[in-house]
Amino acid sequence: MFRLSRAVRLVGSGSRVRELVARHPAVATAATELLAMRLRTMTWMIENLAFRNVIGRVETLIQGCACGRQPLVEGVPDSCARITQQELAALTGSVREVVQRALKTLEGEGAIRLGRARIDVLDRETLEVWAAGED
């Protein structure tokens, strides 16, 4: 779906990892920051799946992308730039057809305007109402 970057994989025993961290404290800092970011993202995803309907989950994702605060992909700040309905469905735990209906509902409310691989936010207040689950 998204291309991140080249990855380096380290394989070794616990003692070798501790030795690496002792010699290079920046490794421990980077690993801790990465784990914290992933934990925040997973917490956000679980909260959305548990407490929001599909429209609320789609809205939350759109709102985050519009504000530049939703990290869809680690280290790729413009991962929202061209996102498909299929990708939105995967990220919100739904299917494309349901996401399409949610987007049409939001468009009908005047919150967004849909384009080809593009969603323009027109009214953030309306989006926030949908995110809160209010009708």
Image (tube, helix red, strand yellow):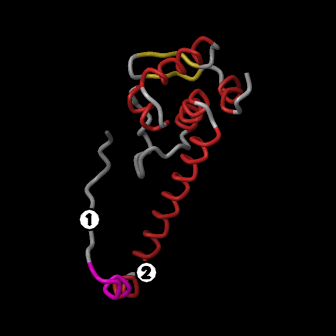
Q: Is residue 93 above or below residue 19?
A: above
Residue shown at the point (27%, 59%) measured from the top left: 7
Q: Which mark is residue 8?
A: 1
Q: Which mark is residue 119?
A: none
Q: Is residue 13 above or below residue 66?
A: below
Q: Position of residue 64 (x, y in %)?
A: 56, 38
Residue shown at the point (56%, 29%) measured from the top left: 54
For the record, the magenta segment spans 12-18
Residue toward you, 1 or 71: 1
Q: Are marks 2 and 1 in contact (CB under 8 Å)?
A: no
Q: Amino acid at mark 2?
A: Pro
Crowding around mark 2 (Cα neighbors within 10 Å: few <14, some 14 to 19, many 20+) is few
Q: Principal SS element in the magenta part? A: helix
**Residue 112 position by quadrant:** top right
User: Regarding mark 2 in the picture, which secondary structure is present there?
Assistant: helix
Residue shown at the point (45%, 44%) measured from the top left: 72
Q: Position of residue 113 (x, y in %)?
A: 53, 15
Residue 17 part of the magenta-drawn span: yes
Q: Amino acid at mark 1?
A: Val
Mark earlier in primary sequence (2, 1):
1
Q: Position of residue 21 (x, y in %)?
A: 39, 82
Residue shown at the point (65%, 40%) measured from the top left: 51
Provide the residue designation for mark 2.
25
